[in-house]
Each structure stands twice: as structure tokens, then as C-alpha cells.
Amino acid sequence: MSGILQTDRPLSFRFWTLANVFTFARFALAPVCAYCFMTQTYWGLWVGGWAGGLAMFTDFCDGYFARRQKQVSDLGKIFDPLADAVFFVLVWAALGLSGAYPIWFVLPFVVREFVQHVYLRPSALELGVVLAANVWGKLKTLVQTLVFIALCWLEFFCHYWPWIESWVKPLNMALIGVTGLVSVLSIIPYFGALRAAQKNLN
């Protein structure tokens, strides 16, 4: 099933590869972006937006160099989606705390990532299987990236034209709500992948 890497070989946990460096950079950029957004200032939003864009670029780079340099590893398959999860949970929480939308809109993202990275992936590793990102996980990341860009621009416009804030906030809520729904739905195939791995080992 898509999303499962059967391991009839030793797990590959190469640490210092160029692809993993880009992944770890995303971990480092996450709190920078969150702090910038929470300042609720023009420059904070500007720097946070560009730092977020850089983080999204590292997401492309880690996959590109992993394939090009044949450095695809099981460690990368674990930490790449974890880096995305940490980045977006922190960014969504920071934007919520800054007033872009009610903070409770972040709850679906937190629950989704908690279930995946605290239950599903560790459970799969106990079976000797790595749950790599599948097409649904990649779709979730794409949607979150596009919405992140949209929210940054909408919040940026509010600094120039404060009168549009009355309709920007409902739009922000709609965008983050749809993104949360996509995020939650995208985890369903991983449950199927874990069940398939369990059946294959029985």
C-alpha cells in the first residue's frame, strides 16, 4: 500500500546527508517564523513570511537532493514529514495567537500530527516498517503551503488597509478550516497502511 516501505533490509539511518541538512533547517526556521508572527508587526509579518518561504524551499530541496544524490534514507522518511508537522503547527498557532483566527482552529492540526508521529509511525517502526509520506500527505503539505502564503498576504494587506480586516478574518477562518479538514482526512490512509503492515507480518 502507498505510504509503506517494507523493510526486508536493515533500516537506513544516515544522519548527515545534504537532504537531511535541509530537513533540519526547517526545524530551525519554525520557531523563527512563529516568533515573527507573534510580534504582530509589519516587519515581523514580512520577515516571518520570507522565512516561511525559505522553509518551504528547503522542503523541495531535501527531496530533490535525496533523489539526485541517491541519499534517500529511512531517517529522512521519518524526519521530513515531522519537520513539516512541527513547522506548520507552530506557524498556525502563532498566527492564531496573533489574531488571524481563533486559536482553537489549530486543534485539528495538533491532534492529527500527534496521532501520526506519536502513535502511527512508532507503531510501524516496531514492525520494522517505515511509513513514508504518501500522496495524501504530500497533498496536505501543498494545501498548507498555499494557505500559508494566502494568509501571509491577507495579514500583510491588513497593515496597509485596516478597514479590510472585517472581512479578512472570516476569510482566514474559512481557509484555515478547510486546511484543517484536509489535514485530518489525509491521515486516514496511514491507518490503512499500518493495518496492511500488521497483516503482512502475521
Image (cartoon, rainbow, N blue to C red):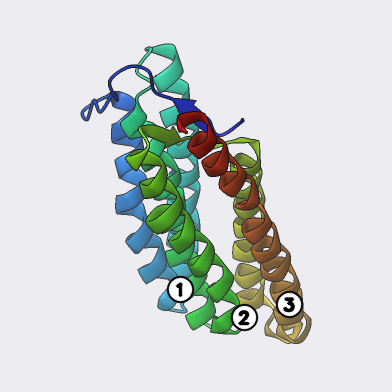
Name the residue carrying label 1.
Answer: 94
The part of the image, by quadrant, that contains residue 21 is: top left
Percent of width and height locating residue 146: 66, 51
The residue that appears at 67% across and 84% down in the rendered structure is 162
Q: Reading the chain from its start, which is encountered first: label 1 or label 3?
A: 1
Secondary element at image label 3: helix
- Residue under pointer 3: 168
Q: Which amino acid does label 1 sit on?
A: Ala
Name the side, left or right, on which 121 lies relative to 21.
right
Q: In this view, does 2 lie to the left or right of 50?
A: right
Relative image position of residue 90 (x, y in whole percent): 42, 66
Instruction: Report the Cα–Cα distance between label 1 and label 2.
Output: 10 Å
Helix, strand or loop at label 2? It is: loop
The residue sitting at 75% across, 87% down in the picture is 166
Residue type at mark 3: give it: Val
Residue projecting furthest to the front: 202
Examine the rendered structure and indicate whether residue 172 appears above or below residue 33.
below
Q: Which residue is drawn at 30% across and 42% down?
A: 24
Residue 101 got which mark?
2
The mark that comes first in sequence, 1 or 2, is 1
- Callout 2, which amino acid? Tyr
At x 41%, y 42%, the residue is: 124
Question: Along the horizontal axis of the image, is 7 left or right of 174?
Answer: left
Q: Position of residue 106 (x, y in %)?
A: 55, 73
Looking at the image, residue 103 sits to the left or right of residue 26; the answer is: right
**Residue at the left extreme, as displayed:** 16
Number of on-image labels: 3
Judge the density around disc 1: few (<14), some (14-19), many (≥20) Cα neighbours within 10 Å: many
Is disc 1 placed on a helix, strand or loop? Answer: helix
